[in-house]
Image: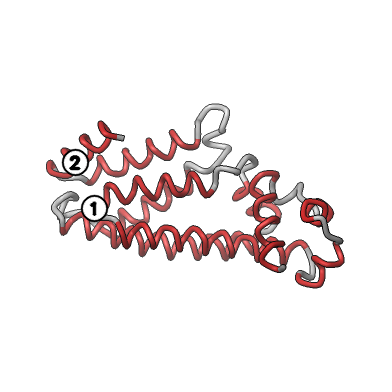
């Protein structure tokens, strides 16, 4: 039951935003009383925290799975982008920025976890690309990983990239290509060009 509540709440938060979704909305959508929800969660804040933790785990597990199966970091980045777009396709209200505004301590904890995960994951992908001769040997893994994280977070800022001007899928695709073109070798560029021709 607890997991059902978390799943429904997370879906509503992504679609309608953290601020506008009430405990009544969640109860109505689930066809249960608020009292039942309160037996599992003390308040909305604890449910928001459980929802963000659940979504973070779901996304990181999916990314780890892609990384395990991928043959090269160029295909890997594309597959991760598709996975993220599918996982977050219900987003309509810039929930991450609402989280920052209305639940700053949850946002701060989530940002630290995201940073640690993305930094480590990106460094491994970069090293894999260098080893395979797809990325330049002299790239600074620590620096490029941090630049990548900063860019990924930046393109999700609705104040800088409003959705009425920038389609999130196109934005993510453009940023991925921008990132890869900056670090590929000649061999990597050939693979990248071929990849974009076929996808």
Apparent side of residue 77 relative to residue 108 in the rendered image (left or right): left
Q: Are marks 2 and 1 in contact (CB under 8 Å)?
A: yes
Q: Whole-percent x and y of residue 110?
A: 56, 62
User: Disc number at residue 59?
Assistant: none
Q: Residue at x 69, y 62 (%)?
A: 4
Q: Secondary structure at mark 2?
A: helix
Q: Earlier in the sequence, mark 2 or mark 1?
A: 1
Q: Secondary structure at mark 1?
A: loop
Apparent side of residue 114 relative to residue 55 in the rendered image (left or right): left
CA gap between label 2 and label 1 equals: 10 Å
Image quarter of the C terminus: top left
User: Disc number at residue 191?
Assistant: 2
Apparent side of residue 28 relative to residue 144 in the rendered image (left or right): right
State the residue lying farthest toward the top. 165
Q: Which residue is mark 1?
A: 72
Give the image quarter of residue 193: top left
Q: Residues within 10 Å of mark 1 (few under 14, many from 20)?
A: some
Q: Residue at x 83, y 67 (%)?
A: 36
Q: Is residue 111 above or below residue 86?
A: below
Q: How is the image coloured?
A: secondary structure
Q: Whole-percent x and y of residue 168?
A: 50, 37
Q: Residues within 10 Å of mark 2 (few under 14, many from 20)?
A: some
Q: Whole-percent x and y of residue 42?
A: 79, 70
Q: How many marks?
A: 2
| Depth check, front residue: 185 or 89 | 89
Image quarter of the N terminus: bottom right
Give the image quarter of residue 46: bottom right
Give the image quarter of residue 8: bottom right
Q: Whole-percent x and y of residue 21?
A: 76, 50
């Amino acid at each position: 039951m607890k997991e059902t509540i978390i799943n429904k709440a997370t879906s509503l938060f992504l679609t309608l935003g953290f601020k506008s979704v009430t405990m009544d909305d969640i109860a109505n959508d689930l066809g249960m009383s608020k009292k039942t929800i309160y037996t599992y969660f003390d308040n909305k804040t604890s449910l928001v925290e459980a929802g963000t933790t659940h979504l973070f785990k779901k996304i990181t597990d999916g990314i780890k799975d892609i990384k395990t199966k991928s043959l090269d970091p160029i295909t890997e980045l594309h597959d991760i982008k598709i996975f993220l777009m599918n996982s977050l396709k219900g987003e309509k209200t810039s929930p991450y920025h609402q989280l920052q505004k209305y639940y700053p301590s949850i946002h701060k904890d989530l940002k630290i976890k995201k940073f640690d995960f993305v930094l480590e994951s990106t460094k491994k992908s970069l090293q894999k690309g260098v080893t395979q001769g797809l990325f330049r040997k002299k790239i600074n893994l620590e620096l490029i990983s941090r630049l990548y994280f900063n860019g990924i977070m930046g393109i999700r800022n609705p104040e800088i990239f409003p959705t009425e001007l920038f389609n999130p899928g196109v934005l993510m695709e453009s940023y991925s290509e921008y990132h890869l073109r900056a670090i590929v070798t000649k061999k990597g560029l050939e693979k990248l060009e071929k990849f974009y021709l076929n996808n």
